[in-house]
Image: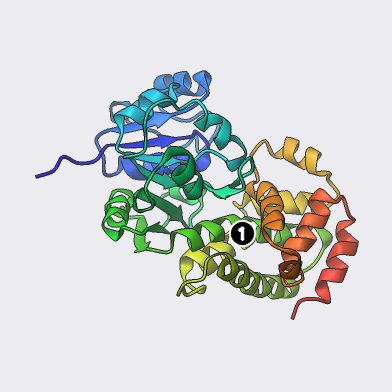
């Protein structure tokens, strides 16, 4: 009988904390890398993350906490990365252990800005991780609801479905239901794009648009997402599955959505910088917007009016009211 795989989580934000909580329902030992010495020391003393999901108490005997990324990576077989896309490149530069034979799981909701690559693509090219050792975690699932143990759903995608099923099993519990998929690239693009559309929903709300417009915005968003993903990676997929449409809806509508919150502030007149400072959390959609804009060629941009509108507001400093007034004529 083969030995059970050892798991480790990299990151200390709300989603990383939620994933550690899910794993702790099933595993006796979890490695946990966090950059902050303060967070580690607080966890060891108070048994909870001081900054995120502080209501979640951990059993310390299950956790192997460390501020050394190499120590955590060398001990584990399955490495789950939950570091925001804006910071993951600099964190991975600290790695000097060989992770090419590890199973890499991305719970990062964005593209690596420095390389323009999906997280899985980056691990394949920069760290020689085989494609069938790369997996992605998708929702619809908010960290805050995991903390409250409200019923939530996850999709784990890997080209090797046996590996996906092993990861899914270790994340499952009475409040987490899981399913598996082999559409790694499509789902990774979907988890990036949904944050852009959530920012759009937030901007619309901040500008005073109501539920009627929001429903039109969301229905156009899923069609736009389908067009974008199909152009990037053509394969058979049902865009109405929960990993695509469900994750988009919860991110676009939920009060827990930091991307919607960020967009709402922009719609109300905040500058990008002031909104980022006040939130004190990373809105992945901000970085994803630039990546999506760069990835889409000129012919494609006209078919991506929502992404283009968000880009114009966030990166071209155009007036949100005027941009969204023009956008309303492009939706149906």
Total numbered badges shown on the rendered structure: 1
The picture quadrant where one finds residue 22 is top left
Near mark 1 (Cα within 10 A), the count class, few <14, some 14-19 or many ≥20, is many
Is residue 41 found left or right of 77 in the rendered image?
Answer: right
Q: Position of residue 54 (x, y in %)?
A: 49, 34
| Residue 243 shows up from this direction | yes
**253 to 75, vertically: above or below:** below
Q: Position of residue 186 (x, y in %)?
A: 50, 63
Q: Position of residue 236 (x, y in %)?
A: 45, 75
Near-viewer residue (156 or 59): 156
Near-viewer residue (129 or 51): 129
Query: Which residue is the site of mark 1?
Result: 193
Picture residue at 41% right of the left edge, 58% below the top: 154
Near-viewer residue (229 or 17): 229
The picture quadrant where one finds residue 63 is top left
Picture residue at 68% right of the left edge, 74% below the top: 220
Residue occupying the far bottom of the picture: 332
**Mark 1 secondary-structure assignment:** helix
The picture quadrant where one finds residue 5 is top left
Picture residue at 73% right of the left edge, 75% below the top: 212
Image quarter (top left, top right, bottom left or bottom right) of the N terminus: top left
């Amino acid at each position: 009988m083969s030995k059970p795989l050892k798991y480790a989580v990299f990151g200390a934000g709300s989603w990383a904390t939620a994933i550690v909580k899910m794993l702790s329902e099933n595993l006796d030992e979890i490695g946990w890398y966090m950059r902050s010495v303060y967070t580690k020391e607080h966890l060891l003393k108070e048994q909870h993350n001081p900054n995120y999901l502080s209501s979640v108490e951990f059993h310390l005997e299950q956790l192997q906490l460390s501020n050394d990324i190499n120590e955590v990576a060398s001990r584990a077989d399955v490495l789950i990365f939950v570091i925001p896309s804006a910071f993951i490149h600099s964190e991975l530069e600290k790695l000097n252990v060989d992770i090419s034979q590890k199973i890499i799981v991305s719970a990062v909701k964005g593209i690596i800005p420095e390389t323009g690559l999906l997280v899985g693509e980056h691990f394949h090219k920069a760290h020689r991780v085989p494609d069938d050792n790369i997996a992605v975690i998708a929702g619809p699932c908010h960290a805050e609801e995991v903390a409250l143990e409200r019923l939530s759903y996850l999709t784990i995608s890997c080209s090797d479905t046996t590996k996906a099923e092993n990861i899914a099993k270790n994340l499952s519990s009475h409040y987490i239901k899981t399913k598996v998929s082999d559409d790694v690239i499509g789902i990774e693009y979907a988890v990036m794009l949904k944050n852009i559309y959530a920012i759009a929903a937030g901007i619309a709300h901040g500008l005073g648009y109501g539920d009627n417009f929001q429903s039109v915005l969301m229905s156009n968003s899923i069609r736009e997402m389908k067009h974008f993903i199909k152009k990037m990676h053509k394969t058979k997929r049902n865009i109405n599955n929960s990993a695509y449409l469900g994750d988009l809806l919860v991110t676009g509508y939920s009060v827990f959505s930091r991307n919607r919150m960020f967009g709402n502030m922009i719609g109300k007149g905040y500058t990008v910088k002031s909104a980022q400072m006040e939130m004190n959390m990373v809105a992945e959609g901000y970085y994803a917007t630039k990546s999506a804009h760069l990835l889409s060629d000129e012919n494609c941009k006209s078919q991506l009016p929502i992404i283009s509108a968000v880009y114009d507001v966030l990166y071209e400093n155009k007036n949100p009211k005027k941009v969204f007034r023009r956008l309303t004529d492009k939706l149906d």
